[in-house]
Amino acid sequence: MRDRGACLPHHQGRRTRINYATALCIYTAVITDTGSFRYSNADPEAFIIAGEMVALGVNAWDVAEKLYECQPIQRLALLGLALNTLEVSTRGDCAAVTVTLDMYEKSGANPELTDGFVNYPRSIRGVEVAVFLREINPKLFKVSFRSKGKVDVSALAAAFSGGGHHNAAGCIMSGNLDEVRRAVFAHLENAF
């Protein structure tokens, strides 16, 4: 059932008319931004908005299937290579994975297919900060930090001239992979 002229409450008390295509975009934005309602921004308003979009005809399964269960084989090949680089700190509170230019060539993947790779080290029990190092040019890495909340990763990124917010931040670092990993893990040790 797709109501093409439904009204939704607006923040200032006005009602706004939206169509199915807009409802689908809003629902998809809420799902991805809240990590399927796993992140701290999954507040009551996010659930209400998602529910309103479903009431307008958005099929939650169709969206989830297209977002999470429809990936090219090259992404899984690249993920396998990346997971082989998994490094966990001696205390077990930090973990990192890496993707190099060579891995793109071996897997046939591209940088766009690395979305979400940082979540794998973050999912390890006891890990508070996850790091994803992605080589963007020879000896140049994009470094993404994700925190479960105890560590302000924006401060970590700022130490390397990067930015972000408390739970998600990043920077660009130059050097070979070993140098970059050592520098990142040294700063992570100090953060705890």
Image (cartoon, rainbow, N blue to C red):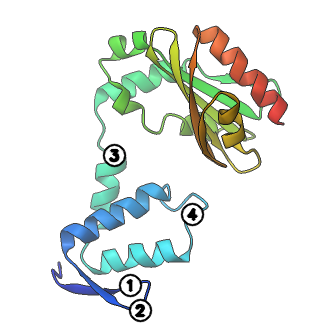
Determine whether 181 is above or below 36 in the image.
Answer: above
Compare marks 4 and 1 and give the one earlier in the sequence: 1
Q: Residues within 10 Å of mark 1 (few under 14, many from 20)?
A: few
Q: Please name the residue that numbered disc 2 is placed on.
A: 13
**Residue 60 visible in the shown view:** no
Q: Nearer the viewer, mark 2 or mark 4?
A: 2
Looking at the picture, how far across and down is residue 59, in whole percent?
27, 68
Mark 3 secondary-structure assignment: loop
Residue 60 is tagged as: none
Looking at the picture, how far across and down is residue 108, in whole percent?
29, 18
Determine the residue positioned at 41% across, 76% down.
Answer: 49
Q: In the displayed orientation, state which residue is furthest to the bottom.
A: 13
Determine the residue positioned at 46% across, 57% down.
Answer: 33
The image quadrant that residue 180 belongs to is top right
Compare marks 3 and 1 and give the one earlier in the sequence: 1
Residue 69 is tagged as: 3
Circles 4, 3 touching at the beta carbon (< 8 Å): no
